[in-house]
Amino acid sequence: MKKLILFFVLIVLSKSTVIAQNVVYEGVVKDKNTKENLAYVNIGIVNKNTGTVSDVKGKFQLLLDNKHDAETMKLSMIGYKSLSFKVADFKKTVIENPIIYLEKSVSELKEIVIKNKNLQTGILGNVLDKKTVSAGFVNNVLGNEIGIIVKLKSKPTFIEAFHAIVDYNKYKELKFRLNFYDLKKGLPNNTILQDNIIVTSSIKKGELVIDLNDYNIMVNEDFFVSIELIEGLGEGGLHFLADYSGSPIITRATSQGKWNKMDDLSFGFTLIAKY
């Protein structure tokens, strides 16, 4: 009888340990000075597929276990200084005070003036081959990101618009972030944007066009352009046309996660540019 009781106690303790290792941590991200809630902040463990994005009210929920306690948790947003913690410290911080503040970064805004009137307008990116396929996001986790490397034809290059061909969209409304990064060792590195590009669209099929003239995007090196999920949409309801001839798709599962290449397949993402 004592052995049975001991066995039962061990089972209970074992289950309690498992539950304790997987906890949902909730909080809100705010501007340090204005105390304004910050929407769509990237929150995640660096190079691990554990992350999320704050909602329109700055709130977030993130399931964390104990195995990554020594790893680095990072919060980042365009226009703000990144904030990093050890995962264990992040947990303690959120438990003690669920409000996390980000401080605005001070950067000198450079006005872009196109002096050369002889610049030509061209298309960069992956112009689809006739043999096209349909592809979409790997999952519906917030922060899931997909994109391609874009090679320049001349320097400097001024980006005017982004184009993608939607094969089908089963959602009532799309909402995502368009990102531009410089490259390091052939993978996305740091953002080259001064402002968030948040896109809302109800397109069901056809060419999605995003005017970028107001964002003053100038590039001098090859770069990476991507679409990032910032609001939950549900599984499998959005596909873009793709093919096997362009720059391979690069993706990461969630915010701050590890970038991975998907060989052969490439989205039909193109940009209208002056160079």
Image: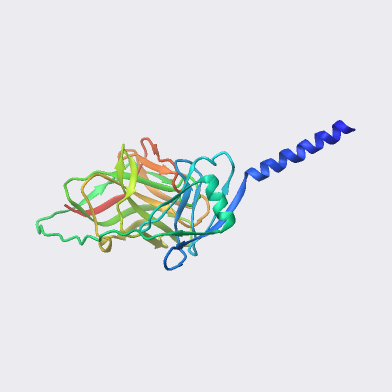
In terms of depth relative to the viewer, which is nearer, 152 or 269?
152
In terms of depth relative to the viewer, which is nearer, 264 or 91?
91
- Looking at the image, which residue sits at the far top? 3
Snapshot quadrant of residue 264? top left
Residue 268 in sight from this viewpoint: no
* Residue 257 drawn at (x, y percent): 45, 43
Up/down of 260 relative to 230, above or below: above
* Residue 3 drawn at (x, y percent): 85, 31
Up/down of 155 relative to 30, above or below: above
Report the side of 183 relative to 202 (left or right). left
Report the side of 5 relative to 212 (left or right). right
Residue 84 in sight from this viewpoint: yes
In terms of depth relative to the viewer, which is nearer, 177 or 76?
76
Report the side of 270 relative to 198 (left or right). left
In terms of depth relative to the viewer, which is nearer, 205 or 21?
21
* Residue 147 drawn at (x, y percent): 36, 46
Instruction: State the residue at coordinates (42%, 68%).
Output: 34
Instruction: State the residue at coordinates (59%, 43%).
Output: 65
- Looking at the image, which residue sits at the far right? 1
Instruction: State the residue at coordinates (31%, 40%).
Output: 184
On-image quarter of the N terminus: top right
